[in-house]
Image (spheres, rainbow, N blue to C red):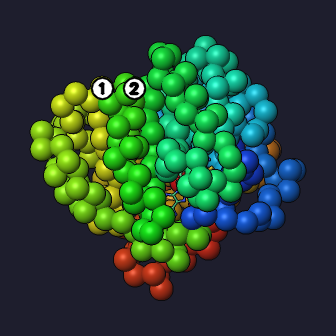
Amino acid sequence: MQDKYGRIIDYMRISITDRCNLRCRYCMPEGIPGIPGEEILTYEEIIRVCSQAAALGISNYKITGGEPLVREECYQLVEGLKQIPGVRQVTMTTNGVLLQEALPRFLTSGLDGINISLDTVNPALYRQITGFDKLSRVLLAIEAAAAGALRVKINVVLQKNVNLGEWQALAELAQAYPVDVRFIELMPIGSGKNQEAVSNHWLLAQMRQQYPGISFDASVHGNGPAVYYRIPGFQGAIGFISAIHGKFCQSCNRIRLTAAGELKPCLCYKDTVSLREAARAGEDDKIRALLEKAVAIKPGMHCFEELSQVTEEHKMVQIGG
Ligand code: SAM
Ligand code: SF4
């Protein structure tokens, strides 16, 4: 599908739950009332929606949440999505806490890659950021995932006065393992509105000082806006996703589907198009029309630099990142 700005929309992020087993301070610092169970799309309904989306040219899918692994049998959704004609890639983003046990099922599900979110390798800081003592589980999951055939990426959000000092230890996960480590600028969504983002320009300058051999990597690593660099001796690359200090809206290729079946054309604005009823009723023509409508109203760009114009009021845990 092409939007009115000429952008090809071929990527959908699917949030399968708004529940989470962590309480990351910038995402879901306290519990929030969850979506009632009956409003959450079933896997069958998600597959119905994605069958129509794939027919319209959306070929890449990311399963997200909340924490996708708190929803049972999530690997079955991967298997179902991979059987849809036109689906090229299915990947997932997780906090990694439940990943080690779940990994064997995902390795045979057809999953093409996994992103593991981790903001520190310091146990005390991990507890401070996420509210739980689960760092060792995440590190074991990273090690196990990196040893398998999956493409693994680590997603890091740096916060001023919290985990800035962790960037090097996190980057060096790409030295220890064949994983890409990506630094995502904090966006003013949910609790992220209360903090200023750490600039990836600043971070790259720090990296240049620490690793003078660092060089731009033009190869394609995925479906998103990350810009990659290579550090000599590192197995994986270092990625920068700079939504604030390197706005990439002109190449935005995505729409989002929330767990309650709302299509979200842009992260920054509250506007959605609900296709839950159409998915429930099995009305494929209507689902297609609603997908086209969501793409038609996709804004040209976000306005994160102008906080008063950001209309999205949900937290990232309710949207899926
Ligand atoms: N629970 C899963 C996880 O942590 O990967 C999937 C959902 S989480 C919302 C997806 C990603 O969004 C995580 O990498 C998280 O760090 C990131 N995120 C959450 N709030 C954010 C914010 N305000 N700005 C930038 N990234 C954010
Ligand atoms: Fe949960 Fe992921 Fe949000 Fe952390 S970033 S609270 S793990 S949804």
Asked if 77 appears above or below 21 in the picture, the reply is above
Q: Position of residue 151 (x, y in %)?
A: 43, 25
Is 148 situated left or right of 273 in this image?
left
Residue 235 tag number: 1
- Is residue 254 at least partly visible in the picture? no
Which amino acid type is marked by label 1?
A: Gln
Tell me the quarter of the image containing the N terminus. Answer: top left
Tags 2 and 1 touching, CB below 8 Å? yes
Number of other residues with Cα within 10 Å of mark 1, as a class: few under 14, some 14 to 19, many 20 or more = some
Q: Within 8 Å of ligand 1, the CB of disc 2?
A: no
Asked if 249 appears above or below 132 in the picture, the reply is below
Q: Could you tell which of marks 2 and 1 lies nearer the N-terminus?
A: 2
Asked if 198 appears above or below 48 in the picture, the reply is below
Number of other residues with Cα within 10 Å of mark 2, as a class: few under 14, some 14 to 19, many 20 or more = some
Residue visible at 80% across and 59% down in the picture: 34
- Residue labelled with disc 2: 177
In the structure shown, which secondary structural element does the residue marked by tag 1 occupy? loop
CA gap, disc 2 and disc 1:
6 Å
Tell me the quarter of the image containing the C terminus. Answer: bottom right
Q: Position of residue 161 (x, y in %)?
A: 45, 69
Residue 287 tag number: none
Is 90 situated left or right of 318 in this image?
left
Which amino acid type is marked by label 2?
A: Tyr
Residue visible at 22% across and 41% down in the picture: 229
